[in-house]
Each structure stands twice: as structure tokens, then as C-alpha cells.
Amino acid sequence: MKWRSRMWCRRLACLLSVPCQHTRHRLLGPSCGRRTFTAAVARWHHTAPESLSCAWQLHGDHLELRYADTLMRFDFVWLRDHCRSASCYNAKTNQRSLDTASVDLSIKPKAVRVDETTLFLTWPDGHVTRYGLQWLVKNSYEGQKQQVMHPRILWNAEIYRQAQVPSVDCQSFLETDEGLKEFLQNFLLYGIAFVENVTPTKEDTQILAERISLIRETIYGRMWYFTSDFSRGDTAYTKLALDRHTDTTYFQEPCGIQVFHCLKHEGTGGRTLLVDGFYAAEQVLRQAPDQFELLSKVPLKHEYIENVGDCHNHMIGVGPVLNVYPWNNELYLIRYNNYDRAVINTVPYDVVNRWYTAHRTLTTELRRPENELWVKLKPGKALFIDNWRVLHGREAFTGYRQLCGCYLTRDDVLNTARLLGLQA
Ligand SMILES: C[N+](C)(C)CCCC[C@H](N)C(=O)O
Ligand SMILES: O=C(O)CCC(=O)C(=O)O
Ligand SMILES: [Fe+2]
């Protein structure tokens, strides 16, 4: 992604290299500020020449605007398409009424005017579009690019322990907005969160889950409940150790959240391992950006083939190990499960070779002991894991062990968080 920032710097540099025009305008005085501009001449216009709070310039196919320390460029079709007038936009439902296909792709504003707070555009058919300058900063590519979509605290074991993230009490989680909000804030920041003093039953675990989301029903059921009874074609249903992984990598959209509640364990071992996949990926980005890029570009398949008893399933999910938003390179999903990774047949041999190297670098980071958080799940303590970020595993165990839980739909967890005022 380096090229992006380099390119951006170059563009920024070129725009910053025109201050002579600002100076000239300041010398010309305030009269030009509110004047309607009709000709497409590249010239800076200032609304408040003394403070230089806003300046704009019309180019052949876009409008350039500087406001609140942000330099923004707006495509003309974009400016027409996002018009918030009553005939183009339904403010009650927040939906677009304008048929975008009716906009001439070479449209240009007939007139442009900016006052202290608002940009006014008049289109060839006479339609007038108004944008608040604050709204533009918040919604422009350049404004948006400066902020992350999901604020997070990346952690290793030490960082997580030092943070002393509290578990939320079950009653406060279920009965107060503050309890729920605190829980969700922790969950969004760290990708894991605990609820304490839960009655150790499947039904009570379901009530917890439904407090924040819809349950995502899968081939494992809605609420699942499992022991080492080999009832399914998967090593989760054994007493074996499981290396760190994310679940349901063989779904086109892996489950967003996993809930675990250990209802019983009479025996030894069986601790849960948690590793922040984004922390590890960040280390790869630092050490070897090209390897990070490869992991985010090469698509692979994961697969689940099951024929046990009455369970017949064949699932395939395709996607890269690291998934990033292309406009800011921010990670949003890691798909990592070496058990369920399918035959690699989507890439030529020389790329395969480089991919294995990159995968090894990531695995080395994921396996560093200092990145491992080990917890023993006990009846009463429910664990929520962001399955798009935090890997889980398990130590081998002896004796009878019963775990219940479910998957949650990510959109609905984030919905609850946003309704409580959190950035999600
Ligand atoms: C959680 N539950 C026991 C229901 C399912 C386990 C699925 C395990 C599978 N290997 C995966 O990683 O997706
Ligand atoms: O048994 C456990 O603690 C977890 C097993 C597992 O990885 C899973 O169920 O997804
Ligand atoms: Fe798992």
C-alpha cells in the first residue's frame, strides 16, 4: 500500500506548491469571496481571505476545496449524485431518491458559490445543490481517509494484562445500557470480552447473546453445545489440542463473533488460547510489507467436508488471509485456519512459493509465546471473541468437558454498538 501514500504525498506536494495564488488572492481583497464563479478557470477563491478558512478552485472535471485543514477534491458526478435537496434525497429515510443513471457523466456545474458554511452548485438544468462544508469534510475521501473505520487496541499478552480490562457483570450487561456499552467498547477495542456471573446453562448463554445480536444459525445449529463425543467430522469434537485459528474460514463470510461458555469440566488441561491476529499482522507489515501485501492479495480456499452420521456438508469459502480496506489499508478480517485450508489451486507456483514464505512470517508472529493469552474458561464466565480478528485455540484435556455457545451476525453486534453511540 506504500504506493498510495507516496502518490498522495506527491499530490499533496503539488497542491501545496501553489501558495502564490493564495497570496495573490489575499492581496486582491475580500470582494472575490462571495462572487459567483462561472468560467472553469483554475483559480483559488477564498470565502474569508483573512483567515483563509475556506478556498476553492474549479478544474475541468472536479472541484477542489480546502476547508478545516483538509484539501478535498470532488468529482462533478459525485457532487450531483449526493445532492441533499428534497427531490434528490429522502431525509426521513436517509435514502437517495435521485436516479443516478439520469445524471450526465460529463456534467459540470453552471455556477459555484461558497459562503462561510455552505457550498452552492447550480447545475445546467437550474437545479441547485447545497453542501455544508462540515458535511463535506466528514464525507469526502480525503476527510474519511484520515480516520480509521474501527478504532482498536492491538495487543500481546503483556499489553492485554496491563490494560486490566474488566469483565462485565451479567446483571449489569443484561439490565443496564452502561453495562452493555462498557462490554461492547471493550469488545470493539480488544476483540475479546467477558461476562461474569452467568448461570451456566445453554438458555442463559442464549439470553446473553441475544442482548447484543441475532444468533447466526449455521450447520452447527443456532445455540450449539459440544463435548468430545466425535459427533461431528471436526477435531473440535475431540480432546486433542487445537492450534490457533479462526472459525468457519470455509464460509464465504466467516462468522463475525463466537461465544463460548464452558458449562462443565471435570478433568485437566483444556485452557483456551487467544491471539490477536491483527497485532501479528501488524508485525508482518512492519518487517515485510510486501509479504503483508501478498497475504492480502492472494485468494485461497478453505473447505469443510463432513460425512459423519446424518451430517453431510461441503462448504467452501474463498478469500485472502488478510483482508484490508483498499482505501486506507486497514485490516478488517483475518482468515487463518491451517486445518481447514483447502488445496491451493488459485495461484501459480512462483507466487505459491512467496505466499508460503509470507504465511510462515505471519505464523511465526502468531506463535510467539509473548502474543499468547491463555485463559481457563469456567462455568459462569462467557467469552465473546471477534472471529474476524482474534484467533482461538485449546490445550488438550482429559475428562468430561462441556462447552456451549453460538455465532453472532457481525452486522447486528455493530448495530447495537452504534446505537449506544460507539464508533463501530
Ligand atoms: C464451535 N463449533 C464447535 C460449533 C464448531 C467448531 C468448528 C470447527 C471448525 N474446524 C472451524 O474452525 O470452523
Ligand atoms: O474446545 C474449545 O475450547 C474450542 C474448540 C474450537 O476451536 C471451536 O469450537 O471452535
Ligand atoms: Fe474453533
Image: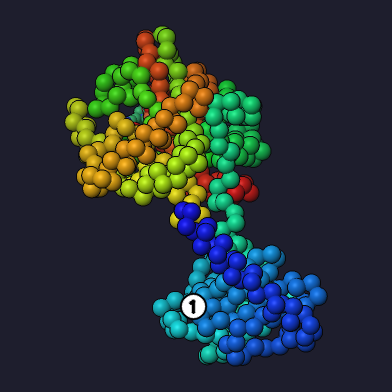
Q: Looking at the rendering, which quadrant does residue 87 occupy?
A: bottom right
For residue 150, say whether it is visible: yes
Q: Give above or below for 349 relative to 268.
A: below
> For the image shown, how many numbered marks are present on the structure?
1
415 vs 360, left or right, is: right
Residue with the mark numbered 1: 77
Residue 265 lies, in percent from the top left, at: 43, 13
213 vs 327, nearest the viewer = 327
Element under disc 1: helix
Q: Give above or below for 359 relative to 347.
A: above
Residue 40 lies, in percent from the top left, at: 58, 87
41 vs 381, nearest the viewer = 41
173 vs 352, left or right, is: right
- Point 22% across, 39% down: residue: 343
Residue 306 lies, in percent from the top left, at: 21, 32
85 vs 219, left or right, is: right
Q: Looking at the rendering, which quadrant does residue 11 occupy?
A: bottom right
Question: Where on the image, by quarter, is ligand 2?
Answer: top left
Q: Give above or below for 118 relative to 301.
A: below
Residue 195 lies, in percent from the top left, at: 56, 28
Indicate the colouring scheme. Answer: rainbow
- Point 55% across, 47% down: residue: 150
- Point 23% across, 44% down: residue: 349
